[in-house]
Image (tube, coloured by chain):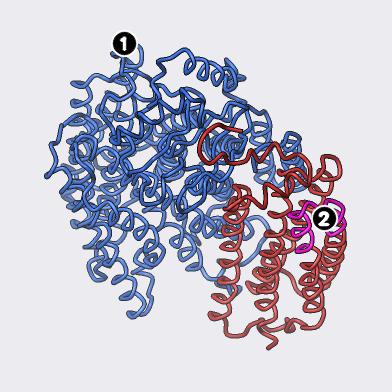
Chain colours: A red, B blue
């Protein structure tokens, strides 16, 4: 430790879960990685804000929305799927909490459960996406273009989140819950909270003609 | 700071030298994560691109020298003026300011040893380089973007522009946006988390406030451009209908999305200039900045208000009067924070003891041209006048005074100001002043008459014009001015090149500057500071007691951080020591990611979507790979 006033901890010397948890408790301000993730998500949220604004911009310009020949979206299945994704936030929250407490196995288990739930969600959404494609095309109208683009962007973010789950599971299993990966779990949790909120907003936008 | 006078202090420094040693040669540059080296790479890359953009401008001016000229073909002319705009905005000013100045100076000014995410910093550079090469491949292949830098649809749609030209623009700007977003995140986190102990926000240099404001603007403005370009490419490549009125789309959607990005972009370009001005003015006026807190708030306010004025670029599209009046009023309001800063700069100079060295001359030139560009900006915020001069050379005059006069002049001044710090050598003062006057006069001669040309009715973006319109003499004057301006710029390059080899030794602090970077050696060592500085005032270098304290702390080994690549992370608001974080040393991973990404975009351009997806997966795997070594997070 450095001689002199303050003597702050060297975070990276915490290579085991218990040590990382101690560093975490001493920390008075969110670490760099969390700020980085939060700002990245601000950028992504702005992208989705732009997509949703485009949807309503085109909606307000249109005489009929959805255009003639396209049915209004069904409410039940997309809502059930999104509800399932919202439920997956429980194991994500648990993973973040247990990582901060240094409970490596509980952290891993929670991420596994969350990852399984999110994979199920994504599979269901891909089926719904395919089903929609059978009925109308993104090449048929501006409605189809923004509808499928917005959903595809959202699903891509879910897929990226699953990839992050997998990477963290791999590294924590191999390396343990060091400070570096603890911050990774916290960042993952923030990512999923943001993507889930975005998904709910995308759902509301998608279903708006049906209300 | 930290003048090493005792054997014990010298031992501390030697140990740091061993820890932070950089690889030599080309491999050293390819694998570097040092913010200063990355800043230098940004500097030279964007300088070369500035040269390319300048050559395009000179060709345009040569073509317009006389009526019915045929120096280049009309199609080439379209590509040249489009590439000139794209280059100057996306490939010169943004990377030069945030990439070169921000990277090199922000960590030094806040007393940190590197950026918050050094590897991401490196990947930002390689992505920026890849995007520049990608866009310029269009020019090399004769298919450069050709629908203007704002690329309006339907002109840019497949029906009217069926080649690959627009795709170089669309994909290139999405690609470039990723690099800029990563840089902005890095700068924000660096400023939030790595400030020296004691450097609370109210003690942070105004330069850093400007870069904080720019980074937030980039973060929230770029998504709109990226989405606009994504829609454009989906329309062009896959037959979607975002901008196709016949299928429920709307061409004005492009204009809205583009200008939601495009107007904040003006402030993204000019705010770093404000930051450079606030660094140079107090130093050469030998007094503290007048209205320090108001200037800091004004910098943030300009960035914020910049998001609410975009429709003033669209006064002629037929929106309702209530809409245009709102945006005209909002555009007027932005005058207030801008005027606060102007007032503060001028008052600081007038009430100080100004020393008119070359850097201050550039800043005075900037103030003059910012006022001219600002006043013509007020005229085009008036709706009836704007409707009269829209798409004429009056607009070209306005934005060149703002973008070249007000944004590039401080960059040039900053190059002179920090040249001694970066190289350890002094530039030639006489040649510096001559280069300023040549550029100043050249700028006026090339751009001011454009106001008159615009009022006389000469439209912008025309390939040539007939004789007898009363435009010939003015165009000829402008072309002469353009070459005068180019001579001034070349003289800067010549002066700095000569000075690099032959200039006098600069020492640590040739200007008696007020910010921390002047306390370390010139050029700074890889670890920036032998001891993490402590700060108790906004003018850290003028606070001698703090710097003497740093020297004593070095003797005691306090705050030296010599157990690896380390720096201090502090609390966000008050900058109190929170933890010591490790920074990654050199790494090849960012370069590899930077190789994979252009491959993906090139495959998209060639319609090989599965191969493009393969490159994306490869980039993802590389990102996972670079975490094999755990460092700061």
x and y percentages locating residue B386 in the rendered image: 26, 65
Which stretch did the figure color magenta? A92-110
Q: Which mark is residue B502?
A: 1
Q: Quadrant of the C terminus of chain B?
A: top right
Q: Residues within 10 Å of mark 2 (few under 14, many from 20)?
A: many
Q: Which residue is mark 2?
A: A107
Frontmost residue, B541 versus B381 = B541
SS for dot 1: helix
Q: Quadrant of residue A140?
A: bottom right
x and y percentages locating residue B237 in the rendered image: 65, 55
- At 74% from the left edge and 63% from the top edge, which residue is drawn? A155
Is B209 above or below relative to B328?
Answer: above
Main structural element of the magenta stretch: helix, strand or loop? Answer: helix
Q: Which chain hosts label 1?
A: B
Frontmost residue, B62 versus B45 = B45
Is residue B328 something that shows in the picture? yes
Q: Quadrant of residue B44?
A: top left
Q: Is residue A45 left or right of residue B206?
A: right
């Amino acid at each position: 430790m450095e001689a002199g006033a303050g003597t702050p901890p060297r975070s990276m010397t915490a290579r085991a879960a218990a040590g990382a948890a101690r560093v975490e408790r001493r920390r008075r301000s969110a670490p760099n990685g969390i700020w980085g993730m939060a700002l990245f998500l601000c950028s992504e949220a702005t992208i989705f804000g732009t997509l949703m604004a485009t949807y309503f911009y085109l909606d307000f310009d249109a005489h009929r929305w959805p255009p003639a020949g396209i049915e209004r979206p069904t409410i039940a299945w997309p809502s059930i799927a999104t509800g399932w994704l919202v439920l997956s936030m429980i194991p994500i929250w648990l993973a973040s909490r247990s990582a901060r407490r240094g409970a490596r196995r509980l952290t891993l288990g929670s991420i596994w459960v969350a990852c399984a739930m999110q994979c199920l969600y994504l599979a269901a959404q891909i089926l719904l996406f395919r089903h929609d494609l059978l009925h109308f095309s993104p090449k048929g109208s501006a409605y189809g273009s923004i509808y499928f683009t917005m959903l595809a962007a959202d699903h891509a973010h879910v897929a990226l989140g699953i990839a992050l789950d997998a990477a963290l599971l791999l590294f924590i299993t191999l390396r343990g819950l060091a400070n570096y990966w603890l911050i990774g779990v916290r960042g993952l949790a923030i990512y999923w909270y943001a993507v889930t909120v975005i998904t709910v907003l995308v759902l509301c936008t998608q279903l708006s003609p049906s209300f | 700071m930290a003048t090493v006078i005792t054997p014990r202090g010298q031992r501390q420094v030697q140990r740091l030298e061993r820890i932070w040693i950089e690889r030599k040669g080309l491999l050293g540059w390819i694998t570097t994560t040092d913010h200063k080296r990355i800043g230098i790479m940004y500097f030279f890359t964007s300088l070369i691109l500035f040269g390319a953009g300048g050559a395009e401008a000179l060709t345009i001016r040569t073509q317009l020298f006389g009526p019915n000229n045929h120096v280049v073909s009309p199609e080439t002319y379209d590509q040249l003026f489009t590439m000139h705009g794209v280059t100057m905005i996306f490939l010169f000013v943004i990377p030069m300011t945030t990439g070169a100045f921000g990277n090199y100076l922000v960590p030094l000014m806040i007393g940190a040893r590197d950026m918050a995410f050094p590897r991401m910093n490196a990947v930002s550079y390689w992505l920026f380089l890849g995007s520049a090469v990608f866009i310029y491949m269009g020019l090399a292949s004769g298919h450069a973007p050709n629908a203007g830098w704002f690329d309006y649809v339907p002109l840019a749609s497949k029906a009217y522009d069926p080649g690959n030209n627009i795709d170089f623009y669309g994909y290139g700007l999405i690609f470039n946006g990723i690099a800029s977003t990563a840089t902005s995140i890095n700068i924000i986190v660096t400023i939030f988390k790595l400030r020296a102990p004691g450097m609370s926000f109210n003690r942070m240099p105004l330069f850093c406030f400007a870069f904080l404001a720019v980074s937030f603007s980039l973060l929230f403005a770029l998504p709109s451009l990226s989405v606009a370009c994504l829609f454009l490419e989906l329309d062009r490549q896959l037959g979607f209908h975002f901008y196709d009125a016949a299928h429920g789309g709307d061409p004005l959607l492009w204009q809205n999305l583009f200008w939601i990005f495009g107007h904040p972009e003006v402030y993204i370009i000019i705010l770093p200039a404000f930051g450079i001005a606030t660094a140079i003015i107090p130093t050469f006026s030998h007094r503290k900045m007048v209205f320090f807190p108001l200037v800091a708030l004004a910098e943030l306010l300009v960035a914020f208000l910049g998001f609410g004025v975009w429709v003033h670029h669209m006064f002629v599209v037929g929106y309702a009067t209530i809409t245009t009046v709102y945006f005209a009023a909002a555009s007027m309001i932005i005058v207030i924070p801008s005027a606060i800063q102007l007032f503060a700069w001028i008052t600081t100079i007038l009430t100080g003891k100004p020393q008119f060295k070359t850097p201050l001359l550039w800043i005075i030139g900037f103030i003059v041209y910012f006022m001219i560009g600002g006043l013509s900006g007020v005229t085009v915020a008036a709706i009836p006048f704007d409707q009269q001069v829209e798409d004429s050379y009056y607009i070209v005059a306005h934005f060149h005074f703002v973008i070249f006069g007000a944004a590039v002049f401080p960059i040039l001044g900053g190059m002179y100001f920090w040249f001694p710090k970066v190289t350890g050598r002094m530039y030639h003062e006489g040649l510096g002043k001559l280069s300023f006057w040549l550029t100043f006069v050249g700028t006026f001669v090339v751009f001011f008459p454009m106001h008159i040309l615009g009022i006389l009715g000469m439209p912008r973006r025309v390939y040539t014009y007939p004789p007898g319109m009363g435009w010939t003499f003015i165009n000829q004057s402008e072309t002469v001015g353009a070459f005068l301006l180019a001579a001034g710029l070349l003289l800067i390059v010549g002066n700095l090149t000569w000075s690099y080899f032959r200039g006098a030794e600069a020492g640590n602090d040739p200007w008696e500057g007020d910010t921390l970077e002047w306390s370390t050696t010139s050029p700074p060592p890889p670890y920036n500071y032998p001891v993490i500085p402590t700060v108790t005032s906004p003018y850290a270098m003028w606070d001698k007691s703090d710097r003497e304290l740093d020297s004593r702390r070095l003797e005691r080994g306090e705050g030296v951080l010599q157990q690896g690549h380390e720096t201090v992370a502090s609390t966000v608001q008050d900058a109190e020591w929170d933890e010591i974080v490790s920074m990654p040393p050199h790494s090849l991973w960012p370069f590899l990611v930077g190789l994979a990404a252009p491959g993906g975009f090139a495959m998209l351009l060639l319609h090989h979507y599965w191969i493009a997806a393969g490159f994306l997966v490869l980039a993802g795997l590389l990102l996972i790979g670079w975490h094999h070594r755990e460092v700061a997070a």
